[in-house]
Amino acid sequence: MAELIDIIAPESDQEGTESFMERWFKQPGEYVEQYEPLLELNTDKVTIEVPAPAGGVLKEILKRPNEPVAPGEVLGRIEIAEKAQVKTVVAAGAKAGAGVEEKETGEIDAPATAAGEAAQDLSPAVRRMLRQHGIAPAQIRGTGRGGRITLEDVETYLAGRQTAPLRQAQGKPAPAPTPDTPSRKIPHTPIRLRTARHMVESMLQTAPHVTAVFDADLSAVIAHREANQAAFAEKGIKLTYTAYFVIAAAKALQALPEVNSRWREDALEIFQDCNIGIAAATESGLVVPVIHRAQTLDLFGVAGRLQDLTDRAREGKLAQPEVQNGTFTITNHGMTGSLIATPIIHQPQSAILGIGKLEKRVVAVEKKGKDVVEIKPMVYVTLTIDHRALDGFQANRFLTEFVQTLENWPLH
């Protein structure tokens, strides 16, 4: 009797980690080498490859795309076999003309082409939409970096295909559309589904949210950035305002360590390191890469880490540890035009900092005992706290320290 080997989901030492099946690289009946990448799991907003535990034929698949996966769960089974034993079977199937395979779930793989097989250049969300609609990548003109196909490209293609003029064989016009409102559905990605559950759990089931709002004058930060960004650029680093926010947040966390914490039923767990997550928008959804031990980095170190993490986040190339063990999060929602927001806490943390849009505003300042009006570059900053762990005065003290750091730049 042939020996079967279980394909096991990897264990995780990170509490609360969730995984979803992303895709299989092989289908039942195909041969796979030992240690060859066999499938992808979407774990904590990063995609990881799971290698084949043995060489042989993929006998059965027990988990389909988008299904949840538990650590240690059996995902499928491999039948031990030598490659020579299955070559004939595969070749015979190819001669029979089996170009498109219909799966048990009813999905049909898009025809394989040279362009279509460049899966490494497609995000998981794009691959999923192509697969669900039976589209070959070669049919779509990519508008992303280097000609990469984006979700918007697929949606545009589908919209064009759905609205193309229809003609009957005799040349008569197609029947008039129904009075129903036209619509289309975009399947949820695993990241979007997990984000949705996480937000509902954080806001409605876990932590009572309270938000404090301050505003900050960024004149000193802007002056420092203008004087130093050329020097950073010479070293290949882009100096962004977010780097300043990370430094100021780390300083404020050290002054108010209770904010750098996690609520537990028996105690408030306060962390020594400031592991600051930065919310980054990607094609698949929101990802939060973490700058670990931010309190030990200078501005150059933070800017370099930011550039590296956000670039790889948008390319889907983050490693799992790079999105884990965050103790505090910053979301710079002002980059897309928002003035003020009340972000939802990234559980199990105790607080999240929101940065609004930088804009010139008229403010009253005192000079030589008199009030004068000036135009200054201002930004609203918010701190949303878990009211179980923190109170309003702690939020205000944190924001006071944060704002003063920015307004009195450079650090002394």
Image (cartoon, grey):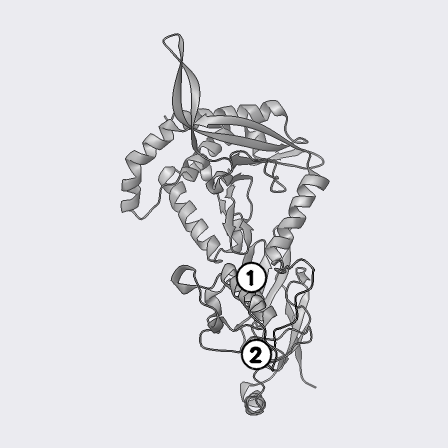
Task: Judge from the rendering whether residue 67 lies leftward or rightward of residue 322; answer left or right.
Answer: right
At label 2, counting other C-alpha atoms closer than 10 Å, the crowd grade (few under 14, some 14-19, many 20 or more) is: some
User: Circle 2 is placed at which residue position?
Assistant: 55
**Residue 329 in view, yes or no:** yes
In this view, the residue in front, 181 or 229, is 181
Q: Quadrant of residue 82?
A: bottom right
SS of the residue under disc 1: helix
Q: CA distance from mark 2 to mark 1?
A: 29 Å
In the image, is residue 26 above or below residue 283? below
Label located before the other in sequence (2 or 1): 2
Crowding at dot 1, Cα within 10 Å, few <14 / some 14-19 / many 20+, comes out as many
* Local SS, label 2: loop
Q: Which residue is mark 1?
A: 125
Considering depth in this image, is 280 or 40 the residue closer to the camera? 280
Q: Position of residue 23 (x, y in %)?
A: 59, 68
In the rendered image, the residue lying farthest to the front is 172
Relative to residue 175, is residue 214 drawn left or right? left
Q: Is label 2 or label 1 in front?
A: 1
Residue 389 image offset from top left, x and y in percent: 65, 31
Work out which quarter of the rendered image holds the C terminus and state it: top left
> What amino acid is labelled 1 in the image?
Ala
Front one among 346 and 142 = 142
